């Protein structure tokens, strides 16, 4: 199983969604708030982050806190 990582990509224009989709799998995006959630392989994270920041339509790239232990959701359904 491949380890996956999610990034939050803030963009200037919704046209950037097509460019962002080339780097991974977009699970969610909103045009109004201008951000997208991008899933990619963990070993590609640093390379993809650098390449995304080079795009003119991308403002900022952050690592998602969802995988962080503090924010991890545990569902114990019995």
Image (cartoon, rainbow, N blue to C red):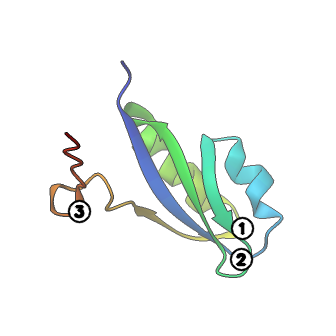
Q: Who comes first in sequence, dot 2 or dot 3?
A: 2
Badge 3 vs badge 1, beta-carbon distance below 8 Å: no
Q: Which residue is mark 1?
A: 56
Place residue 30 in its image quadrant. Answer: bottom right
Q: Who comes first in sequence, dot 1 or dot 2?
A: 2
Residue 69: assigned label: none
Residue 12: assigned label: 2
Place residue 45 in its image quadrant. Answer: top left
- Extreme residue toward the front, this view: 78
Q: Which residue is mark 3?
A: 71
Give the x, y percent position of residue 66: 33, 58
Crowding near pointer 2: few (<14 within 10 Å), some, many (20+)? some
Tally the numbered discs. Answer: 3
Give the x, y percent position of residue 40: 50, 38
Q: Secondary structure at mark 1?
A: loop
Q: Who comes first in sequence, dot 3 or dot 1?
A: 1
Crowding near pointer 1: few (<14 within 10 Å), some, many (20+)? few
Judged left or right of residue 1, residue 20 is right
Give the x, y percent position of residue 21: 70, 46
Q: Secondary structure at mark 2?
A: loop
Which residue occupies 16% across, 63% down? 70
Judged left or right of residue 13, residue 71 is left
Residue 7 versus residue 22 in the image, above or below: below
- Extreme residue toward the top, this view: 1
Give the x, y percent position of residue 26: 63, 48
Q: CA distance from mark 3 to mark 1?
A: 31 Å
Crowding near pointer 3: few (<14 within 10 Å), some, many (20+)? few
Residue 16 versus residue 13 in the image, above or below: above
Q: Secondary structure at mark 3?
A: helix
Badge 1 vs badge 2, beta-carbon distance below 8 Å: yes
Q: Nearer the viewer, mark 1 or mark 2?
A: 2
């Amino acid at each position: 199983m491949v380890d996956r990582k999610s990034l939050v990509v803030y963009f200037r224009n919704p046209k950037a969604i097509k460019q962002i989709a080339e780097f991974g799998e977009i699970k969610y995006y909103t045009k109004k708030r201008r951000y997208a959630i991008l899933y990619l392989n963990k070993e590609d994270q640093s390379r993809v982050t650098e390449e995304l920041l080079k795009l003119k339509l991308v403002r900022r790239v952050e690592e998602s806190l969802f995988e962080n232990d503090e924010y991890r959701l545990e569902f114990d359904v019995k």
